[in-house]
Image (cartoon, rainbow, N blue to C red):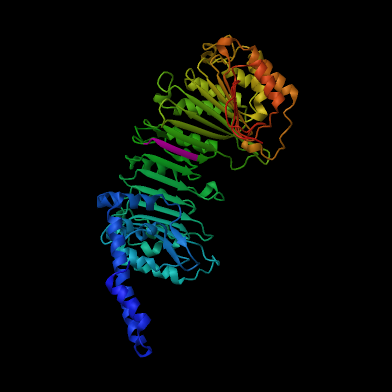
Amino acid sequence: MWSAITERLIHDAQTAPTSAAHTHQSRVVERIHEVEGELRALKTCHNMLAPISRLPVEVLMSIFMTLAGLLEEEFDWKTDTQKALSWIRVSHVSSHWRGIVIDCAAIWATIPVDSDKYVSHLQTMLGRSRDAPLSIKLHNPPGRHYHTPQPRPATDALDIFQPHLHRIRDLEIIGDVNVITKFSDVGQMLCSLTLKHEAGNAGPNREHFFRMEQLPCLERLHIEGMGFIEWKLLPLGHNITSLHMQAPYNYRTGSRPSAHGLLKSLREMPQLHTLYLERHLPADFNTVPPHTSPGVDVAICPALETLFLEDSFPIIAEFLRHAQVPKINKVAFRMATLDRRTENFHPLELRKLLLGFVPPSWKPGKGAVRMLEFYSYQYSGDTELQFAIRFDADEDDANLTIMSAGSIGEYLSVFVEQLDFSKLAYLRVDTDIMSPSDWGNVSRLEMLQTIAICWQALHILLAVIHEGNPGGATSNTRLDNSYAPVPFPALTRIEVEWSEWDRSQALDDLGWEKVRYLSEVLSSRPKSNRIHTLDFRSGCPKFTMSHYDLLRNSAPDLEVIFEDGGPDSDDETDENGYHELEGE
């Protein structure tokens, strides 16, 4: 059973005299170490025979690096001062994996730093990364006393990066970005710079840090919370592909950077692909010299495809009048007012804006809309509407968020005049402020197959389905040309859920009258225009078996899906088409 050496040690232990016990014990300890070494060697052999260990080293390196990039938390904290890299666990599986991880310089080159915690891992990671380009992710929580900042030992430890500044490719600082002074001599390899200032102080001296000659390779610049920065102070050059500027909410228009500087910078960034300007747009476009020669008052962005603007309507409108974006395919406008009592806009102004901005690819016949969504968020008495429009291609997307000064119908008429809705197949309305006449405007569309609606507005939709357009013919010729004698002629599916913005209200009783009306509407549809699926989603009032029976009798072929559960919990579809996902 045992090896000869072990058998002899066991036998001698039983017969050894007391005087020789210590010597024999030392021999046993020595044998234990030998056996442990053999055990480790056997385990290594066992792991080497596993299929995953036979993968090429390059493949395992790629897997480990992907894992490190996917983990949300960069550290596994044991105590406030002891931690380990989250992905380091893969190196504990086997000595083979550990050897691969230690030898992979790239995986050690992405260095997370929390200056308020333990930073002793920096030396190890810098050493093992060898000469690989570095990605530094620094979280620097603001000090307790903003006005009298004191250096912290952990922050001082960042001096360890000084010999490696030339290797930094990506730099991200969140918190108090004054620590940027530790990286003021960053090398020419820097491609991405992210600064998110979350401290109460003013932030670093921009004139001393942002020097374009230092950052000729910079491609991505993201700055938040540092107030307004004049464009000439930013390291913007011909390699920039992504620019994200976000000013704090408490900043006023008077100190904004100039329109002339913005237009000049846009002309100098021919490769700009993504532009986010959140409350960082100029307010002085009226100072731009009048158009006297081509390009003086207009900036052409030949590569721009994604645009996000958040500001007041007049400021956004002025920007769009001075910018040309021939390749745009995703745009989001979030229009908020600095003073909601006096500053707002009418849908007619939106019409003027779209007339000048909507690119040719969105015109009828080239960018037919397949999906349209309306959302409504109600905060402190203000109504905010958000529109999301998706076109043929998956990447095409347009969002518009508006502090509403008009009805959904008014805004819808503006979009219909500018965009082709003849192929609209999906409509989502997460608001109950869409009137019957608004619904009537889309009830004629001949390809609309699915409507997703909040429970609070279902009765309005049912009335339009049952009675037609209460407002008669619409004034919009494009919708008139799509006239169909039956409202929503292609509608086959209705999805219903409780609106997210109205969760505070108590769920009302479903009531027999509502179920009877629903049954009446469904049964009155012509056979060729029948609605096949009702999907009751999260938060809708509970249906009783009697309610089920009423629907079953009125529409035998109807599939009803209850995602919050029905009275039975068999999780199967019965012979009448009821699909009960969960029981009560």
Frontmost residue, 81 versus 245 = 81
Q: Give yes or no for residue 176 being in the magenta stretch.
A: no
Q: Nearer the viewer, residue 30 or 223?
A: 30
> Where is residue 6 drawn, in percent x and y?
31, 73
Q: Farthest residue in the bottom direction?
A: 19
Residue drawn where x is 59% and y is 21% of the image: 575
Q: Position of residue 527 (x, y in %)?
A: 58, 10
Name the image quarter holding the N terminus: bottom left
Judged left or right of residue 367, residue 36 is left
In this image, 32 relative to 346: left or right?
Answer: left
In the image, is residue 478 above or below residue 540?
A: above
Q: Is residue 104 visible?
A: no
Q: Is residue 487 left or right of residue 83?
A: right
The prevailing secondary structure element of the residues shown in magenta is strand
The answer to which quarter of the image holds residue 26 is: bottom left
Task: State whether residue 277 appears in this view.
Answer: yes
Whole-percent x and y of residue 193?
38, 53
Magenta range: 304-309
Residue at 33% x, 49% y is 63
Give whichever of 465, 406 is nearer the camera. Answer: 465
